[in-house]
Amino acid sequence: MAHTDPETRVRELGLVIPDFAARPYYGTDYGSMKPHHITGNLLFLGGHTADDADGNVRNPGRLGADVTVEQGYEAARLTALNCLGGIRLALGSLNRVHSLVRSLCFVVSTPEFEDVHKVSSGATDLFRDVFGPEAGLGGRATIGVMSLARRSCFENWLTVEIDG
């Protein structure tokens, strides 16, 4: 299947992206913030987690203790879907994305857990599938942390380059 444009690719992949225009971005439930900031041709997304439409944390806990790598990967993938919803809220369409510049990933883990990079791939694999390998893969850093709000096991911050 040939890559066309991101919105078409989302339909081809059968992805369900939350509509934050219909249901407000959930990040503000965590404190004072806004969903995104645009300056010049850069979009900075606020932090996204794997919360569902009802505000429930999906796959809560800590990698290396009560969350498996596979569950963490899935939480990262669900977080990426929420990030796509955030991009749509900010830009109106995923087709306005020129490329992903940076993905900063936080994985809640035990001190001994070293596979944080395998968890983050749940997000970046999805971005690659939607935007293609050139535009969908930017720089990525993954940091193991002790906790995130409401026991989320994964959070992502994205910086996106916008077309024209």
Image (cartoon, grey):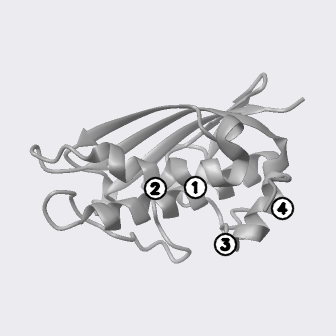
Q: Residue at x 23, y 64 (%)?
A: 61
Determine the image quadrant of residue 58: bottom left
Foreground residue among 103 and 43: 103
Mark 4 burial class by Cα count in 10 Å: few <14, some 14-19, many 20+: some
Which residue in the protein does label 2 denote?
A: 122
Look at mark 4 in the image and give the residue it sits on: 8
Q: CA distance from mark 3 to mark 2?
A: 16 Å
Three-letter residue code for mark 3: Val
Residue at 67% over, 72% down = 16
Q: Earlier in the sequence, mark 4 or mark 1?
A: 4
Residue lying farthest to the right in this orientation: 164
Q: What secondary structure is found at the residue carrying circle 2?
A: helix
Q: Amino acid at mark 2?
A: Gly
Q: Quadrant of residue 24?
A: bottom right
**Secondary element at tag 3:** loop
Q: In this view, which residue lies farthest toward the top?
A: 40
User: Furthest residue to the left?
Assistant: 112
The residue pinned by badge 1 equals 126
Question: Along the polypeptide, which appears first: circle 3 or circle 1?
Answer: 3
